[in-house]
Image: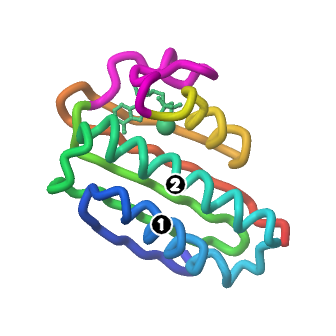
Amino acid sequence: MDNQMCVEFDSKSENEAFARIVAAAFVAKADPTLEEIDDIKTVVSEAVTNAIIHGYGEKGDQKVFMECSLNGKKIQISIMDKGVGIDNIEEARKPLYTTKPDVHRAGMGFTFMETLMDTLEIFSKPGEGTTVRMTKNIEG
Ligand SMILES: Nc1ncnc2c1ncn2[C@@H]1O[C@H](COP(=O)(O)OP(=O)(O)O)[C@@H](O)[C@H]1O
Ligand SMILES: [Mg+2]
């Protein structure tokens, strides 16, 4: 493995910007294009927002974890929470599916993650939490 890092931060909405800047800085070594950097920022924002809003119900005193590794040109990003978890992962991945239509935008978070990254895996257990793991090959 070429490089690896892990950060832990409070489940506060201002940390969404923190997390995406950290991930963008980490991937810089793989010489990404501006578009690839934007993609990384978008998916980190979506996953961290999900952890804060859905996982922890906007309770700001919980912890969100982000782990990134770089293997050559391949980046892997994992976002983890110890929140409520997801009952039906298959359903949650569907475009426009949302359990909070009033609060948040349109149920497209997982769809963005799936489209902008090469792979998306979701591990979740009700009552235990959720881990979202994504990979992308940086073409540069
Ligand atoms: N970290 C998480 N913890 C619990 N539930 C989640 C989490 N991430 C996503 N979900 C569930 O999956 C649904 C779809 O997520 P997403 O595609 O990002 O749409 P949105 O966030 O707009 O609802 C959410 O409405 C929520 O029910
Ligand atoms: Mg979302």
On the image, which quarter does residue 11 sit in? bottom left
The percent position of residue 103, horizontal first and vertical second, equals 41, 32
Q: In the figure, is residue 13 to the left or right of 30?
A: left
Please tell me whether residue 138 belongs to the stretch shown in magenta.
Answer: no
CB at disc 2 and ligand 2 closer than 8 Å: no
The percent position of residue 41, horizontal first and vertical second, equals 61, 62
Q: Nearer the viewer, residue 98 or 5?
A: 98
Q: Nearer the viewer, residue 103 or 82?
A: 103
| Disc 2 residue crowd, few under 14, some 14–19, many 20+, Cα 10 Å | many
Res 45 label: 2
Quarter containing the N terminus: bottom right
Q: Residue furthest bottom?
A: 29
On the image, which quarter does residue 2 sit in? bottom right
Q: CA distance from mark 1 to mark 2?
A: 7 Å
Residue drawn at (34%, 50%) of the image = 80
Q: Is residue 126 above or below residue 8?
A: above
Name the kind of residue labelled 1 in the image.
Ala
The percent position of residue 63, horizontal first and vertical second, equals 22, 57
Residue drawn at (63%, 22%) of the image = 95
Q: Residue furthest front?
A: 102
Q: Main secondary structure of the magenta part?
A: loop
Q: In the figure, is residue 4 to the left or right of 135?
A: left
Residue drawn at (52%, 54%) of the image = 45
Q: Nearer the viewer, residue 13 or 88?
A: 13
Read off the magenta span.
85-103
Residue under numbered circle 1: 17
| Disc 1 residue crowd, few under 14, some 14–19, many 20+, Cα 10 Å | few
Residue drawn at (24%, 41%) of the image = 56
Name the kind of residue labelled 2 in the image.
Ser
Secondary structure of the residue carrying numbered label 1: helix
Do the CB atoms of the residues marked 1 and 2 lie less than 8 Å apart? yes
